[in-house]
Structures are given as structure tokens and as C-alpha cells.
Image: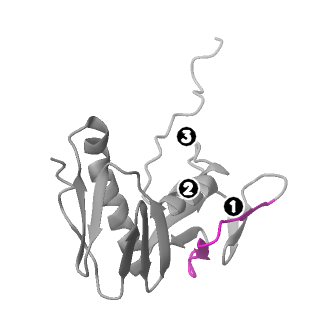
Amino acid sequence: MSRIGKNPVIIPSGVTVTIEGENVTVKGPKGELKSKFESGLEITANEKEIVVKRNDESIKSRSLHGLYRSLLANMVEGVTKGFEKKLEIIGVGYRAVANKNKITLNLGYSKPIEYTAPQGIEFKLDEEKKNIIFITCIDKQLLGEVAAKVRSFRKPEPYKGKGIRYENEYVARKAGKSAAGGAK
């Protein structure tokens, strides 16, 4: 039995869960999330909790058991608290300008990069330090995709560490060219 899958998802007050066949809708104070789950698992909900049960012991249903429970837990957490990722811009002259779901990045290229995020994503900059980007969303998967896309515009390079990185991301540094060892 999946250790994650057998735990019920607690539904906080103010959140409603509706299950119609394979479609699950979670509504809360921050918004609404919908998702479609394959058959093979039974998803039931009452006022207090969501329970995911397997119909059989096939490899597919065993592997999806914990996954579906985690996805449902993320949906409930997203509509109550929301999710946030922090990206850090490191480099001389690198900066960003954020405006709701649009961000403009100056990253050392000849032209600035303008990126408009999908609906539901919101960009903010740190007030004190303008080099930290806060990305918020209620959908954890969409948030991860957008954060990875923004990071891909200028990944951290290993020599000076310049670029966009996740907060507290470790970048392995390489030594530069060696002055010794050339022609004698």
C-alpha cells in the first residue's frame, strides 16, 4: 500500500470539492482548480477529507495512487494558501521590471526579453533588492513551468555565476583559465 496514498487529504473550511466522474474541481478563497484523473482509482470526498482508494493491485494503479493523492493535496493547498517561487538575478546590469503577469528582463543581450505568463501567474519584485523575482500562482505545476521558463532565459553560468537562479540554488563553480602552464 502506498504510504502517501493511504493518507486522506484534509479539506479546510471555505474549500469545496466536487467530483463528477473523472473530473475533480476544488474551489477556495484564492480561486478554482480543475483536473481530470484517470479511472482505476476511486476518489471520494466528504466535508472534511478526500480519500483515494485503489480498485485493484495492478502496477499502474499502485503507481498512480500516491501521485493522485499528492496532486489533490496540492490543489487544496493552492486554493487556500497559493504557491510562490523566488528567482534571483545575479550579474552587473541584469535587472527586471514586473507588471502583474508580464515581466521584462535585461540580461546582457542586445534587446530586453519580454515574457507574458499564462493567466493565473503573477510577478512581483522585491522592494529593497530589485534582483529577486517573486512568482505566485495557485497551480503548483504551472508555477514550476513558468519559473523554469524564466530561468531558461539566462541560466547561471559556472565561471562567474551570473544568470537567473532559484533562491538558494547551488551553482557548481569552475576555475577559469590558468595563467601558468603555457609556453616556456
Instruction: Choose between 15 and 122: the one closer to the eye.
Output: 15
Give yes or no for contact between labels 1 and 2 (Cβ–Cβ under 8 Å). Answer: no
Q: Which residues are magenta?
A: 112-129
Residue that badge 1 annotates: 94
Q: Quadrant of residue 179?
A: top right
Give yes or no for contact between labels 3 and 1 (Cβ–Cβ under 8 Å). Answer: no
| Magenta residue check for 92 | no
Q: Which element carries disc 2, helix, strand or loop?
A: helix
Q: Which element carries disc 3, helix, strand or loop?
A: loop
| Magenta residue check for 120 | yes
Image quarter of the C terminus: top right
Task: State the image coordinates of residue 66 (x, y, percent, origin top left).
Answer: 27, 52
- Residue type pointed to by label 3: Pro
The circle on residue 158 is 3
Residue that badge 2 annotates: 145
- Residue at position x 37%, y 51% in the image: 39
Task: State the image coordinates of residue 137 (x, y, percent, origin top left).
Answer: 52, 71
Report crowding for label 3: few under 14, some 14 to 19, many 20 or more residues within 10 A (C-alpha): some
Please tell me whether mark 2 or mark 3 is closer to you in this view. Answer: 2
Q: Earlier in the sequence, mark 2 or mark 3?
A: 2
Q: Which element carries disc 1, helix, strand or loop?
A: loop
Report the colour scheme.
one colour
Distance from the alpha carbon under mark 2 to that under mark 3: 23 Å
Q: Earlier in the sequence, mark 3 or mark 1?
A: 1
- Seen in the picture, residue 115 relative to 76 is either above or below; the reply is above
Q: Earlier in the sequence, mark 1 or mark 2?
A: 1
Q: Quadrant of residue 160?
A: top right
Q: Is residue 23 left or right of residue 73?
A: right
